[in-house]
């Protein structure tokens, strides 16, 4: 349990605390991604019950999602960037919560409850978070002239949200938290760090790599999956370039319009030829060659290509790829397909099976891959060397900047150093590299971390100072953290319960497979 909380809070610390300090009514959004969708099912289904709503009814679905959208807009001031599927899941969990409210006889919302609830809505808050009556009045005035939602709709949604909030509070439970969990998270949140960071430039690290043939052969055998050549199609094409038809276009001075008309002429010519080939019923081979020669057409080559990608020479569009994938010896020519330069007819030659190439065929790529992997491995080794150098120099009394400069010269790499004044993870410096934060767990005062990596940098973090907060169970910070974690854990319980309830209802009314 402790490790789970540490991971969740450490990776999403600022976001989690923003959620805990915001409204809690939409907490079950955390797990909406796990809720199954409705699915396509049998198109003939005309009714599918979902807690009294008909999921097959456009009107019911529209009302469910519209109400959910209003709910989020009121409480968060927006729909919080949710995509369509997330909105649908939120809407279904909202209906499930209202179903529980009916089952548990949760009373309808009273006028005083609605007044208090409205004053806490994000959409009516000023920049300091306080209720702004002017915003509220402006919102009501806008509804009177709106062709969409009415005041009655908003009032109904608010009343439902209050009942939903009561259900969530019942589902939340006590949110039990162990004292060690609180101490762990309090230490993560409020420990004061004074750091210096040495940033190692990967581009400046250029080790002398001279792999032997034996090195490359070993690397190839261990990584042969990288070089597997997939099944491909060998084909050619008959080209109908729009440029060849521009002279037939008349009556326009617009170059762009002239080209578009030329493309249409090229497409028609390609379509006519494809139909002529179909009518001829020519077998593949010499008769086809003679037929093309008689029609003054030449077959242009294409490099072998994977069916799902299509020939790169023709733009690799999905249409061309789909057409190419359908070709074989019995159906060796395609219909006309559009290309960037006009139109074309694909002519199948052979289907090439997947194969493992010889090392000699891919030696240049193997060498490049070996060099990339070996350079990264040596960069890791460099990190350990630099860390030892920094530790020794700092222990001898050198400043961090001087120690970093010495380490850079000794290893012929570029290193930039920067120091950061005391901070906590609640408000880390904006320019502190994110990978450096991941090394704080195992960092003690006066020590240098192992090197953290991203795509083009390495980071060595030095803890010049580390001050733990008051971890006493009687402290105010301890009580606040315990309440926050308890709320978070409790809300996860409510979220999981509602998600399971939605899944069960969808399964109960799932149309039979035919």
Image: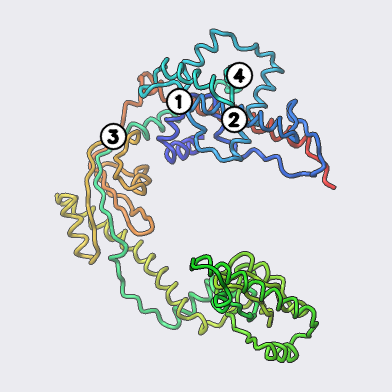
The disc, 1 or 3, on the residue closer to the chain's N-terminal end is 1
Q: Which mark is residue 170?
A: 4
Q: Is residue 385 left or right of residue 320?
A: left
Q: Which residue is mark 3?
A: 192
- Between the C-alphas of marks 2 and 3, the distance is 34 Å
Name the residue: 50% across, 12% down: 116
Please indicate whether residue 420 sits to the left or right of residue 377 in the image. left
Cβ atoms at labels 1 and 3 below 8 Å apart: no
- Pointer 1 residue: 22
Instruction: Check the image and report above or below for 85 versus 28.
Output: below
Please state which of the two labelled residues, at mark 2 or mark 1, is closer to the viewer.
1
* Sequence-wise first label, 1 or 4: 1
Task: Tell me whether circle 4 and circle 3 mark residues in contact (CB < 8 Å).
Answer: no
Q: Nearer the viewer, mark 4 or mark 3?
A: 4
What is the spatial separation of the Cα atoms under label 4 and label 2, in whole angstroms?
Answer: 12 Å
Q: Position of residue 302 (x, y in %)?
A: 59, 80
Q: Nearer the viewer, mark 2 or mark 3?
A: 2
């Amino acid at each position: 349990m402790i490790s789970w909380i540490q991971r969740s809070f450490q990776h999403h610390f600022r976001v989690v605390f923003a959620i805990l300090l915001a409204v809690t009514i939409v907490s079950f959004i955390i797990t909406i991604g796990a809720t199954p969708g409705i699915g396509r099912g049998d198109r003939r289904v005309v009714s599918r019950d979902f807690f009294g709503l008909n999921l097959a009814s456009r009107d019911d679905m529209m009302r469910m999602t519209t109400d959910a959208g209003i709910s989020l807009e009121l409480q968060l001031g927006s729909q919080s960037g949710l995509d369509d599927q997330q909105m649908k899941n939120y809407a279904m969990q909202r209906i499930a919560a209202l179903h529980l409210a009916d089952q548990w006889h949760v009373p309808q919302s009273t006028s005083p409850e609605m007044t208090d609830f409205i004053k806490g809505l994000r959409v009516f808050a000023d920049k300091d978070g306080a209720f702004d009556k002017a915003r509220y009045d402006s919102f009501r005035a806008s509804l009177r002239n709106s062709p969409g939602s009415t005041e009655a709709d908003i009032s109904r949604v608010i009343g439902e949200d209050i009942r939903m909030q009561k259900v969530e509070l019942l589902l939340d439970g006590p949110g039990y938290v162990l004292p060690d969990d609180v101490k762990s998270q309090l230490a993560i949140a409020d420990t004061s760090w004074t750091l210096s960071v040495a940033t190692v430039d990967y581009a400046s690290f250029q080790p002398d790599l001279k792999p032997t043939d034996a090195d490359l052969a070993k690397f190839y055998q261990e990584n042969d999956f990288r070089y597997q050549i997939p099944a491909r199609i060998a084909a050619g094409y008959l080209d109908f370039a729009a440029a060849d038809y521009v002279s037939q276009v008349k009556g326009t001075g617009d170059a762009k319009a002239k080209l578009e008309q030329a493309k249409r002429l090229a497409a028609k010519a390609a379509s006519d030829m494809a139909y002529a080939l179909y009518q001829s019923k020519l077998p593949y081979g010499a008769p086809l060659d003679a037929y093309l020669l008689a029609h003054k057409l030449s077959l242009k080559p294409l490099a072998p290509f994977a069916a799902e990608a299509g020939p790169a020479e023709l733009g690799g569009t999905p249409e061309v790829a789909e057409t190419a994938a359908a070709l074989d010896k019995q159906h060796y020519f395609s219909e006309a397909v559009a290309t960037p330069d006009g139109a074309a007819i694909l002519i199948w030659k052979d289907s090439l099976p997947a194969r493992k190439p010889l090392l000699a065929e891919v030696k240049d790529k193997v060498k490049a891959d070996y060099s990339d992997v070996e350079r990264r491995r040596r960069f890791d080794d460099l990190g350990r060397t630099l860390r030892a150098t920094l530790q020794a120099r700092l222990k001898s009394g050198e400043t961090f900047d001087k120690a970093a400069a010495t380490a850079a010269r000794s290893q012929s790499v570029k290193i930039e150093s920067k120091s950061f004044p005391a901070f906590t993870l609640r408000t880390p410096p904006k320019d502190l590299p994110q990978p450096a934060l991941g090394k704080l767990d195992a960092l003690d005062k006066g020590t240098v971390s192992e090197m953290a990596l991203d795509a083009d940098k390495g980071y060595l973090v030095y803890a010049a100072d580390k001050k733990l907060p008051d971890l006493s169970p009687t402290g105010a910070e301890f009580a606040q953290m315990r309440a926050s974690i308890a709320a978070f854990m409790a809300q996860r319980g409510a979220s999981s319960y509602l998600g399971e309830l939605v899944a069960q209802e969808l399964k109960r009314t799932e149309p039979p497979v035919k």
